[in-house]
Amino acid sequence: MPFQTQPITPAPSAQDVQALRGNTVLEFGTDWCGWCKGAQPLIREALESRADVQHLKIEDGPGRPLGRSFRVKLWPTLVFLRDGQEVGRSVRPQDGATLAAELARLPRD
C-alpha cells in the first residue's frame, strides 16, 4: 500500500491492528499539526522504496483509543509493526536516516 495522504476512517481498533499480517507503519497525527505536515516529505520518501510496507495514517487526539493503546504522546509518531507487533518507533522524525533505520528492521517480504 503506498504512502497515504489522508487518515483512514474509521480508524482500526487495537484488535484489528494486532491481526495485521506483514509489515505496517502506523502514522499517528493530525492534519493541522505543524510537526506532522513537516514530516510528510520524509515519510513519503522513506516509504517509496518499500512497497511491501502498508502505511496507515491515523487521526489521533482526545477520545481516539488506538493512539492511547500505543501510548502516543507527540505527533507525528510512527509505529513500525511486523505481523501486528511493534518492532520500532519514531517520534517527530527529522531526517530520512532515522526512518530508514526503523524500516530496515522490517524484513522484506
Image: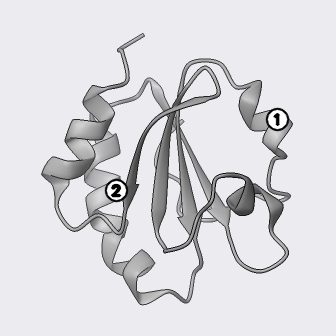
Please tell me whether mark 2 sits on a helix, a strand or a loop.
Answer: helix
Q: Which mark is residue 43?
A: 2
Q: Which mark is residue 65?
A: none
Q: Nearer the viewer, residue 56 or 16?
A: 16
Work out whether mark 2 precedes mark 1 in sequence or the reverse, and give the earlier one: 1
Instruction: Give the image's coloring scheme.
Output: one colour
Residue on which the image places disc 1: 16
Task: Identify whether 91 is placed above or below 1.
Answer: below
Q: Residue 4 in the image: x percent, y percent?
A: 54, 54
The amino acid marked with disc number 2 is Ile
Residue 31 placement, left or right of 18: left
Q: Residue 26 in the image: x percent, y percent?
A: 56, 48
Question: Residue sitting at 35 percent across and 14 percent down?
Answer: 108
Distance of mark 2 from mark 1, alpha carbons?
Answer: 23 Å
Q: Nearer the viewer, residue 46 or 86?
A: 86
Task: Identify whether 29 is placed above or below 51.
Answer: below
Question: Residue sitting at 57 percent across and 63 percent down?
Answer: 28
Q: Are marks 2 and 1 in contact (CB under 8 Å)?
A: no
Question: Residue sitting at 22 percent across and 41 percent down?
Answer: 100
Task: Identify whether 35 is placed above or below 67.
Answer: below
Q: Residue 104 in the image: x percent, y percent?
A: 26, 28
The amino acid marked with disc number 1 is Asp
Mark 2 surroundings: few (<14), some (14-19) or many (≥20) residues within 10 A: many
Q: Nearer the viewer, residue 46 or 60?
A: 60
Q: In what quadrant of the picture does the N terminus appear?
A: top right
Q: Nearer the viewer, mark 2 or mark 1?
A: 1
Q: Residue 85 in the image: x percent, y percent?
A: 60, 28
Residue at the far top: name it.
109
Question: Residue sitting at 65 percent across and 18 percent down?
Answer: 21
Q: Quadrant of residue 109?
A: top left
